């Protein structure tokens, strides 16, 4: 698969064209399907390739290094779409659906987000009503659904009302998009990832048979979590590929470029930027490899590791891409250069499948509630005493007194972020003897942890923030400086003229 993707990138793929035309080239889906790339982890008995987790992240890293659109096309289907079906659908449904998904004859996506909710999954308003015959009727609106207008199946999450009219909780359903009442809405125009369409979807009395249930009634978040955890590993691995490719370019340029101080690569500040970027890349790589080693050996991955992969994997890798763009100077700002496209495309990774702020606060809040549950994840490691001392300072922070919800959110965010750095520091410290580069990565991670600890400790007592009303009033006055410049000129009309429509 890796060979296929590399050859395909060199000989067939035209990322520039897909970006400009906002769509995939025609041959892409059948070509990827033939290479087995739509059934990466689907078991062989359902005609998939049944790759291990360690091999799968290599595929995501490879795809990510080529084109974010390619990665997300494969990943939405393989990590958000397939796992809930593989783990939670009935066997007769699995035998019918998984082979067609594995062969790429049909695509599957996942619909969680709605106009009124994104990060807060518990606020889902789409409604499923159970009928006396055991089937369900779904109504609601979904938004931002990748491949929403193209997928044949959608794993859809809705709030269930049971036979007695009682709220039975969020429930997952496998919805066939050719069902009557399933309405595909328009595509949004996004900043990056332009070839992957995101559509709104409306469900108007869509009938789902009893066998369309994913898992148990009211336990939809368990099925959704399966997709999120796989998705978070995928995002970190894909972003890693992008960072590696951006660094390759930055390195080539720096070695060839002469500036006022001599060779650019030999300028101390530039050397520092490249060294930090390489350390970040290596640290994230060690994290995802550690996680997939655990998964492949049948052991459980502690949940905070998934958060660390999503938060630091996506934040750091996008930062590396940004730094490489800066290092390339004017060439970085040229849109036909891969790094510029990565900068737009990978920006998304900080937002979707759990935006950084939302999940950092969530992780921190869970640690504040049960600190020892979090700190016990380090029992499996031989943590050196100095590092253990840093980690214990996070524990001390969890006892900070807060007044009011806002301070609690800030503290949770600090603790969540520190927890991710603690994980990265402990993991990279274990590998520090492998080579001088690994040793540098371990020291860099530890330094990051120390810097963040110092900032968190120095920010106590909390600085008093302006009130929400004061902020709104102040920002409201900006209009005195910049005026009302909202553009009202009518755009292009796309709707079919009323006199030309059917009926
Ligand atoms: C290109 C693209 C593809 C997508 N594909 C899909 C898809 O296939 N399926 C799907 O279901 N969804 C998809 N989404 C939706 C995506 O998952 C959501 O946009 C994302 O979860 C964020 O939700 P939101 O936009 O409603 O932002 P909100 O949840 O409203 O968040 C707004 C801001 O508030 C912050 N915030 C939110 N909660 C907290 C908190 N508790 N503490 C502190 N800060 C917080 C966030 O970090 C963010 O900065 C896609 C989105 C995009 C842009």
Image (cartoon, grey):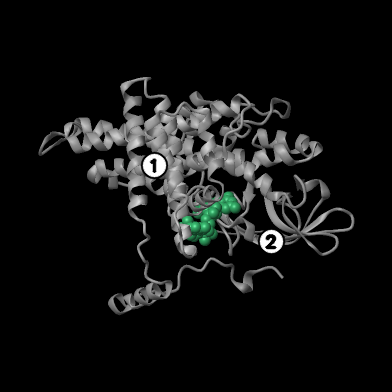
Q: Nearer the viewer, residue 97 or 424?
A: 424
Q: Is residue 198 left or right of residue 64?
A: right
Q: Which residue is mark 1?
A: 316
**Labelled disc at residue 126:** 2
Q: Nearer the viewer, residue 324 or 469?
A: 469
Residue 469: name its quadrant: bottom left
Q: Nearer the viewer, residue 437 or 146?
A: 437
Element class at badge 2:
loop
Instruction: State yes or no: discs 1 and 2 in contact (Cβ < 8 Å).
Output: no
Residue 59 seen in the current view: no
Q: CA distance from mark 1 to mark 2?
A: 35 Å
Q: Is residue 146 left or right of residue 489?
A: right
Name which residue lies at 62% across and 73% down: 498
Name which residue lies at 37% across and 60% down: 462
> Split into 4 quadrants, where in the image is the N terminus?
top right
**Identity of the residue furthest to the top in this view:** 434
Residue 296: name its quadrant: top right
The percent coordinates of residue 380 (x first, y second) are 53, 28
Q: Is residue 50 left or right of residue 339?
A: right
The percent coordinates of residue 433 (x first, y second) are 37, 20
The percent coordinates of residue 461 (x first, y second) are 36, 59
**Labelled disc at residue 210:** none
Residue 391 seen in the current view: yes
Q: Nearer the viewer, residue 160 or 179?
A: 160
Packing grade of label 2 (10 A; few <14, some 14-19, many >=20) is: many
**Identity of the residue furthest to the right in this view:** 133
Name which residue lies at 63% across and 48% down: 110
Q: Is residue 43 left or right of residue 342?
A: right
The percent coordinates of residue 328 (x first, y second) are 25, 41
Q: Is residue 93 above or below residue 441?
A: below
């Amino acid at each position: 698969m890796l060979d296929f993707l590399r050859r395909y990138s060199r000989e067939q793929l035209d990322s520039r064209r897909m970006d400009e035309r906002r769509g995939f080239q025609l041959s892409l889906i059948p070509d990827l399907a033939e290479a087995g790339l739509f059934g990466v982890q689907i078991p062989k008995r359902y005609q998939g390739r049944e790759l291990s987790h360690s091999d799968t992240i290599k595929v995501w890293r490879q795809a990510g290094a080529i084109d974010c659109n390619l990665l997300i096309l494969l990943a939405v289907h393989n990590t958000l779409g397939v796992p809930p079906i593989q783990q939670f659908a009935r066997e007769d449904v699995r035998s019918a659906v998984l082979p067609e998904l594995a062969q790429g004859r049909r695509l599957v996506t996942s619909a969680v987000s709605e106009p009124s909710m994104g990060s807060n999954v518990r606020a889902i308003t789409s409604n499923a009503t159970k009928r006396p015959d055991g089937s369900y009727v779904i109504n609601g609106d979904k938004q931002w659904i990748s491949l929403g207008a193209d997928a044949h199946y959608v794993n859809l999450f809705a709030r269930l009302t049971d036979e007695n009219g009682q709220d039975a909780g969020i429930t997952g359903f496998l919805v066939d998009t050719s069902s009557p009442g399933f309405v595909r809405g328009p595509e949004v125009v996004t900043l990056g990832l332009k070839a992957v369409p995101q559509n709104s979807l409306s469900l108007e009395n869509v009938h789902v048979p009893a066998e369309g249930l994913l898992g148990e009634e009211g336990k939809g978040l368990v099925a959704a979590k399966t997709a999120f955890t796989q998705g978070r590993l995928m995002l970190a691995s894909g972003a890693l590929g992008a960072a590696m490719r951006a660094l390759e370019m930055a390195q080539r340029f720096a070695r060839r470029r002469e500036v006022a101080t001599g060779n650019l690569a030999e300028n101390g500040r530039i050397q520092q930027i490249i060294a930090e970027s390489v350390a970040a890349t290596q640290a994230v790589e060690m994290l995802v490899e550690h996680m997939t080693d655990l998964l492949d050996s049948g052991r459980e991955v502690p949940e905070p590791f998934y958060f660390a992969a999503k938060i630091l994997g996506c934040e750091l890798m996008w930062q590396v891409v940004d730094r490489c763009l800066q290092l390339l100077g004017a060439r970085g700002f040229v849109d036909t250069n891969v790094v510029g496209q990565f900068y737009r495309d990978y920006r998304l990774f900080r937002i979707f499948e759990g935006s950084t702020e939302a999940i950092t606060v969530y992780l921190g809040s869970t640690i504040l509630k049960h600190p020892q549950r979090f700190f016990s994840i380090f029992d499996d490691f031989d943590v050196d005493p100095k590092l253990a001392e840093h980690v214990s300072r996070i524990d001390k922070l969890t006892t900070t007194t807060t007044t009011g919800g806002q301070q609690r959110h800030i503290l949770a965010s600090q603790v969540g972020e520190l927890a991710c750095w603690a994980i990265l520091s402990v993991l990279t410290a274990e590998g520090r003897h492998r080579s001088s580069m690994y040793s540098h990565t371990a020291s860099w991670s530890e330094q990051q942890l120390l810097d963040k600890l110092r900032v968190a400790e120095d920010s106590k007592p909390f600085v008093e923030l302006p009130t929400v009303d004061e902020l709104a009033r102040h920002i409201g006055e900006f209009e005195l400086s910049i005026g009302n410049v909202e553009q009202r000129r009518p755009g292009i009309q796309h709707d079919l003229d009323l006199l030309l429509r059917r009926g």
